[in-house]
Amino acid sequence: MTSSTEPVTREWNGLTIPAAGTYLLDAAHKRVGFVARHMMVSKVRGEFADASATITIAEEPLESTVSATIQAASINTAQADRDAHLRSPEFLDAEKFPTLEYRSTGVKSHEGNEFVLTGELTIKDVTRPVDLKVEFEGVGRSPFGQDIFGFSASAEIDREDFGLTWNVALESGGVLVGKKVKIEIEGEAIRQS
């Protein structure tokens, strides 16, 4: 936590952004979710309940970095049998590969409050480049004296690129589980230093 005399924000390219420092994802104010197609006709939504991230806001904002760790076993789609299958070796193999990891490698572009982070996502033992579209939502100081900022982020991945190839062909054509998975993240981050 910072003292109340330190600046919470600064102006940059027409935006009010957080002061430089290290911020941690607030576990109480986050959602790390995903959407996948089911039977070619509907969408299944889920989330990972246990995720952490460190966001380093640099003096030069475009040099800021993110590293995130998601606990594979915390997957939740509100259906116990499906969740157990997703934790199994046919999908995430959560016992052998307990975490999914994301590390940013740079900022590809920005326009207004929207940024595109380049980075690498690791699922199981496979690492692939993934661009994360990030929307900066705002910054302030909480009633508890914490400097915070909010953001949302999204990406789309092909799960088969990460070795998640299990599927069942449908008699009507197509497959049980779509290849494309949309990642949806909402969160607040709290300044640590």
Image (cartoon, grey):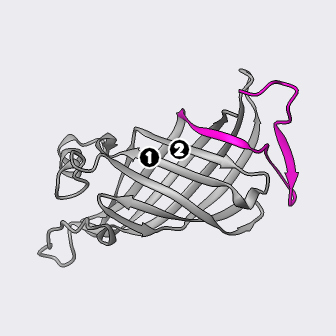
Instruction: Report the residue marked by disc 2.
Output: 53
Residue 162 in the image, given as x and y percentages of width and height: 32, 67
Which residue appears farthest toward the left when viewing the image?
A: 171
Is residue 55 shown left or right of residue 69?
right
Residue 136, position in %: x, y? 69, 52
Q: Is residue 47 left or right of residue 25?
A: left
Mark 1–mark 2 Cα distance, whole angstroms, equals 6 Å
Q: Which residues are magenta?
A: 1-27
Q: Residues within 10 Å of mark 1 (few under 14, many from 20)?
A: some
Look at the picture and state if 20 lies above or below 157: above
What residue appears at the point 78 percent right and 63 percent down from the top-left corner?
112
Q: Amino acid at mark 2?
A: Ala
Could you say which is closer to the camera, residue 77 or residue 121?
121
Residue at image x 24%, y 43%? 79
Instruction: Determine the secondary structure under disc 1.
Output: strand
At which x and y percent is residue 152? 60, 52
What residue is disc 1 on? 69
Seen at 71% across and 28% down, the residue is 146
Residue 11 located within the stretch drawn in magenta: yes
* Residue 26's disc number: none
Q: Earlier in the sequence, mark 1 or mark 2?
A: 2
Q: Nearer the viewer, residue 187 or 35?
A: 187
